[in-house]
Amino acid sequence: MLILERYKLTLDYLSKTIGEAETELHYKNPYELVVAVSLSAQCTDKRVNLTTPKLFEAFPNAEAMANSNSDVIFSYIKSISYPNNKAKNLLAMAKMLVNDFNSIVPSEVDELIKLAGVGRKTANVIASVIFNKPTMAVDTHVFRVSNRIGLTTNSKTPLQTEKQLIKYIPKDIIPRAHHWLILHGRYVCLARNPKCENCGLKVLCKYYAKQSNKKNVKQNTTIKQHGKKNSKKTSKKG
Ligand code: SF4
């Protein structure tokens, strides 16, 4: 199958089965999304959503957070993974937003990654979700799903996956495709036990084909072994 055909069939399927998709993080403005995405590193969106209402109530904007200190911020986010580091980064990020960006979240990835605690993945999410830019944030789901389906080849890093995906996905679809791949990975193509039998992509999925081949080889070997045993028994009797 040609790579473009693989992409087209995959995106058509995900578009039909998932449709409109958006981030599961709760936010009301760009500042809140930067905070929520930063908190979501190594943590579930669910947990972040349980934490942010009180945090945003205490710090409704970057100025309020910049005027606080990391101990106070920590007290609001202590149930989240790596709260110490995240509290320090949030404080530094808020100060940078106020001092260097006039309290306005920048729209370009190159600017966003200057903010404390904002890596390429976070910057891509913000650029895509808030500013509808054709950026592809590669998290663990996007990385795994793209590799299994065969949208990427020999990709060893998130950046390699990002580059391969944006090469073939039409620009206007990239922001939605990002969510489709995440949701497919979160609910169907699970890391440990992917639900292949319920997945319409198995007709083209490279991982599924590989697993099916392995199963067939195993079954054939077992059948052959049974055959040998039976023929030994028969020859003994004879
Ligand atoms: S067939 Fe299985 S491995 Fe392939 S995309 Fe679907 S769930 Fe994932």
Image (cartoon, rainbow, N blue to C red):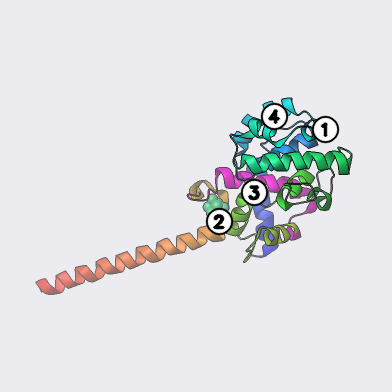
User: Which mark is in front, 4 or 3?
Assistant: 4
Q: Nearer the viewer, residue 228 or 105?
A: 105
User: Which residue corresponds to mark 3?
Assistant: 181
Q: Main secondary structure of the magenta part?
A: helix
User: Which residue corresponds to mark 2?
Assistant: 203
User: Which mark is in front, 4 or 1?
Assistant: 1
**Three-letter amino acid code at disc 1?**
Glu
Residue located at (72% from left, 45% from top): 176
Dot 2: element: helix
User: Which residue corresponds to mark 1?
Assistant: 63
Quadrant holding the C terminus: bottom left
**Three-letter amino acid code at disc 3?**
Leu
Residue located at (69% from left, 55% from top): 8
Task: Let me know if residue 181 is in the magenta part.
Answer: yes
Q: What stretch is highlighted in magenta?
A: 167-193
Of labels 1 and 3, earlier in sequence is 1
Whether residue 143 is visible here, answered yes or no, is yes
Disc 4 to disc 3: CB gap under 8 Å: no
